[in-house]
Image (tube, grey):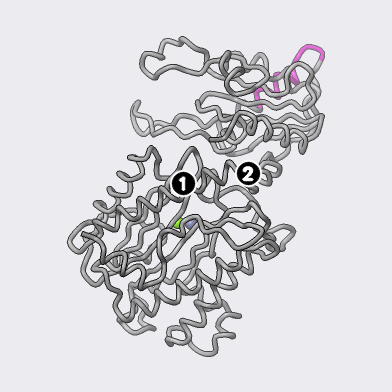
Amino acid sequence: MIGIEEFSQRRLELMRMAGKNAAIVLAAAPQRLRNSDAPWPYRQDSDFHYLSGFPESEAVLALLPGRPQAECVLFCREREQPDEPWRGERVGTARAVTEFGLNDAFPIDDIDDILPGLLEGRERLYCHFGREPEFDAHLLTWMRRLHDARGGGVVPRELMSLGYLLDELRLFKSRSELKLLRRAAQLAVAAHRAAYAVAQPGRFEYAVEAELLRSMRAADAVPCYPPTVATGKNACILHYVDNHARLVRGDLLLIDAGAEWHYYASDIARTIPVDGHFTGVQRELYDIVQAAQTEAINMVRPGKDWDSVHGAAARVITEGLCALGLLQGDSRAALESEAYQRYFMHKTGHWLGLDVHDAGDYRIDGQPRVLETGMVLAVEPGIYIPPDDITVPAAYRGIGIRIEDVVVVTTSDPEVLSADLPTAAEQVEHMLAARS
Ligand code: ZN
Ligand code: MG
């Protein structure tokens, strides 16, 4: 769990970065409706959670560095609203202060009257633009009110992108965040294991997905993205989520599924043979991806950068595909021309944290971001041979393989959070042999 002090520390750090004459305003995620009045499961906005831990919708956080009365102000719903019997108890303004460490809290219904005054005289306003059209409209209304105030209020002269400061903070994970990320990865590993037990010939992709979800929910976690359960050529569709096909003996099954634990994500992919044994051709491609992942993970060290990580994976995959004759010519030339992109069309990884594709720049001034201790990333090379690719022998067509793990940059060796789930082909077969 993230303690109240850590949330407070994050706000202080952000306010220090923003400077004394700034204001920072951000909104809670709205409750979205699935259809009619049935809501989607609610998930707080990651930035809002990062800075407050406050779990409800219809809330706005305003940070006002240097304001003597109160620097951290929350607007939220009041207690004892008529819908509490339906939707349950709310936090309310009083507990927002005592339980979430905010300096002051007001009813959200009063925000139009109060917030413009809080922004008065601030030089810069940090916020997200274009994320929530409704919030953007409110923001303009508040600026307008301030402008129209009697005597003419001083409207912030500069509108700044909040992500510019906040993404940089979120990129470096604290000890308590790493604990939650470790747990999220463990829960995803358990879900994968549960899914493999039913991933047998004759079963359906959705039945495998059901095991993933059952395992996560039984541990009070939720999936942090819709799981990909892709058998046979479906694995060549990178974000396949239909999950309707039947598992066939002799096919591979690609499972990409992550669990979210206390808002923190995990992202794990494995590709297993449905009947427990890789065919010769599957094994050829699998070993390339596995070697590529091992080399890429080995690059996750302070001082290396994204190009080192992706470059290692691309090199191993290119060499492997050239050796098999699936790419033509000399592997060095094939790497140079990025010919591998025909079969490995995505990047090798992404930041991971509160979001599965987490906040943070991948390049700075055109240069690849250098890795530093406390950064967390997913490493996920793959090979996908399109089913209709007539340039390769038929036996290779329609094979899709991805192996993905979550890795922490440490001062020594990379820490693989999902290391409990084997990747080496023999170990995968051994694990599958133990299925009932
Ligand atoms: Zn991923
Ligand atoms: Mg993934």
Asked if 23 appears above or below 365 in the picture, the reply is above
In front here: 368 or 98? 98
Q: Quadrant of ligand 2?
A: bottom left
Image coordinates for residue 25, horizontal then vertical, percent: 66, 29
In front here: 436 or 216? 436
Q: Earlier in the sequence, mark 1 or mark 2?
A: 2
Asked if 21 appears above or below 257 in the picture, the reply is above
Distance (Cα) linking label 1 and label 2? 15 Å
Residue located 53% across and 45% down the image: 355
Image coordinates for residue 392, horizontal then vertical, percent: 37, 83
What label sits on residue 174 in the rendered view?
2
Magenta-tinted stretch = 140-151
Image coordinates for residue 219, horizontal then vertical, percent: 37, 40
Main SS class of the magenta portion in the image: helix
Please tell me whether mark 1 sits on a helix, a strand or a loop: helix
- On whether residue 143 falls in the magenta region, the answer is yes
